[in-house]
Image (cartoon, rainbow, N blue to C red):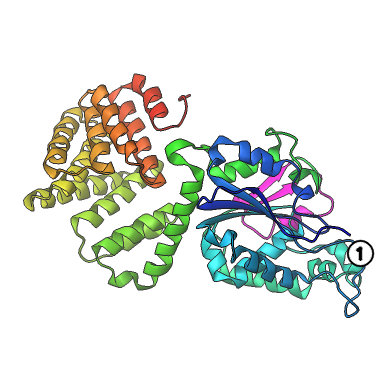
């Protein structure tokens, strides 16, 4: 008698984030994935992820309903996924990255549509060869098995699933998402695995329906795609740990769920929190619009708006964005100085230094603002991440690279959140480039755990 399906533990260190595999039709929790769990566990950027596989009942045998037992319908298996992720050990994870093969992706879609609590914890969803639009070749065999009937193109299950995905998830999921097809997959055509989703989420890898989830080593293209999705293009480590960023992404989405419905009534703290959360999940335009439409902003949300405009200027080079960002930073600095608010003053002063150099090409003004930032850091008496990061950046503008590294080292010693660490690192490398301190770039890279700069 074969073993009953169950949750398979590949690695459990009781962290905050877990990768969970779901196999496909006639597969199982271990054999389907080959060396995937082993290779993921060995990847340094994924060291803080726990890894599991969910098993369920599926086979090639005929269903004989009403006699003794039969393989369950996919909608029932979606409920199984909801249940397994809602009890120990999976219920304790703040972020879940769900990776599904073939029919397993249909189970997962059904589960996340039915369970808002599960949806709130999903940081990543990746489908490999999932027939999201159904299978034309399944239709003649619909009488044979319930699971095949549900997978058939045009079935009630598929039709309902696609409509509910559109209504509930929409074109831009709140989680990091990818759908992967094999270039020689004759079982699930790309019209079913890829076309239901926007091109931005589509990937094609080498292999047939089974080979795409059977990596021999870390050079397997499907493995590389999954690592890239889980970690981001930089495959970051150290202060940019992928598991921490996954947890943070769920916190941002929860903030949006809570604050967005009453965004017109938020105080300054709420506006800043919501704007940062929106940008962090890719809604930069919404963040800018939110703050721009506010009738009266304090110095903190003024800085948040300026920061969003600065980032858009760096990406798109719109002169108006740079001009507005600099004006906002200067006005906010003047207000902070008038109130003797040193903590706000050093934040706005260092950004005035950056914008004067990056946009205005004025090194003299940049250094004057950098010195102001250092003075206000000392006056603030704070011992937090942003105080020390500001001292690091200001020292770069003033040509003191030793003090710059010391400041960033102190900031990192306080274990900043991934978003904070990424922001510091990006700003530090920009400042080094602007001031011509190219020799410090590798030292910054090593300090921030990014490896040698290329």
- Residue 105: percent from the left, percent from the top? 70, 59
Q: Is residue 275 magenta?
A: no
Relative depth, front residue between 360 and 246: 246
Q: Label 1 crowding class (10 Å Cα cut-off): few <14, some 14-19, many 20+?
A: few
According to the image, label 1 marks what residue? 61
Image-quadrant location for residue 423: top left
Q: Where does residue 426 sit, x and y in percent of width and height? A: 37, 36
Quarter of the figure that contains the N terminus: bottom right
Q: Please tell me whether mark 1 sits on a helix, a strand or a loop.
A: loop
Left-right relation of 251 to 300: right
Q: Is residue 159 above or below residue 105?
A: below
Residue, far bottom: 66
Q: Residue at x 23, y 41 (%)?
A: 387
Task: Examine the structure image and report whether residue 198 is included in the region drawn in magenta.
Answer: yes
Q: Identify the residue shown where x is 41% and y is 45%.
A: 418
Between 93 and 326, the one lying in front of the other is 93
Q: Residue at x 50, y 44 (%)?
A: 242
Magenta segment, which residues?
179-205
The residue most toward the top is 439
Q: Is residue 224 visible?
A: no
Q: Residue at x 13, y 46 (%)?
A: 342
Q: Is residue 46 left or right of residue 341?
A: right
């Amino acid at each position: 008698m074969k073993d009953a399906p169950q949750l398979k533990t590949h690695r459990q260190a009781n962290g905050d984030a877990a990768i969970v595999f779901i196999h496909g039709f006639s597969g199982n929790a271990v054999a389907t994935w080959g060396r995937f769990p082993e290779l993921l566990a060995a990847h340094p950027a994924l060291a803080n992820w726990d890894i599991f596989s969910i098993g369920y009942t599926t086979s090639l045998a005929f269903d004989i309903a009403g006699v003794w037992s039969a393989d369950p319908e996919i909608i029932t298996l979606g409920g199984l996924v909801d249940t397994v992720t809602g009890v120990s050990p999976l219920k304790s994870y703040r972020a879940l990255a769900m990776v599904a093969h073939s029919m397993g992706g249909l189970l997962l879609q059904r589960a996340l549509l039915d369970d808002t609590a599960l949806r709130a914890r999903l940081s990543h969803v990746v489908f490999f060869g999932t027939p999201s639009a159904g299978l034309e070749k399944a239709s003649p065999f619909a009488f044979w098995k319930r699971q095949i009937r549900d997978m058939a193109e045009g079935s009630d299950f598929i039709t309902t699933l696609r409509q509910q995905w559109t209504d509930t998830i929409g074109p831009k999921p709140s989680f990091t998402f990818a759908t992967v097809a094999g270039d020689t997959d004759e079982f699930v055509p790309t019209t079913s695995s890829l076309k239901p989703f926007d091109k931005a989420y589509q990937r094609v890898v080498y292999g047939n329906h089974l080979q795409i989830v059977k990596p021999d080593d870390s050079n397997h293209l499907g493995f590389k795609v999954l690592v890239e999705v889980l970690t981001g293009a930089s495959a970051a480590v150290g202060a940019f740990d992928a598991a921490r960023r996954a947890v943070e992404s769920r916190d941002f989405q929860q903030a949006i769920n809570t604050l967005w419905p009453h965004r017109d009534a938020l105080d300054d703290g709420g506006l800043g929190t919501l704007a940062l959360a929106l940008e962090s999940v890719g809604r930069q335009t919404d963040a800018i619009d939110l703050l721009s439409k506010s009738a009266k902003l304090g110095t903190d949300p003024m800085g948040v708006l300026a920061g969003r405009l600065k980032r858009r200027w760096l990406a798109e080079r719109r002169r108006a964005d740079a001009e507005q960002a600099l004006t906002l930073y200067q006005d906010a600095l003047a207000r902070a100085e008038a109130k003797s608010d040193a903590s706000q003053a050093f934040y706005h002063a260092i950004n005035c230094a950056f914008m004067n150099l990056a946009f205005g090409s004025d090194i003299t003004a940049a250094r004057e603002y950098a010195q102001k930032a250092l003075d206000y850091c000392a006056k603030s008496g704070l011992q937090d991440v942003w105080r020390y990061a500001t001292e690091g950046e200001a020292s770069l503008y003033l040509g003191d690279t030793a003090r710059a590294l010391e400041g960033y080292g102190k900031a990192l010693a306080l274990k900043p959140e991934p978003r904070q660490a990424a922001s510091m690192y990006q700003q530090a490398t920009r400042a080094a480039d602007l001031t011509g301190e190219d020799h410090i770039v590798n030292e910054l890279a090593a300090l921030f755990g990014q490896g040698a700069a290329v």
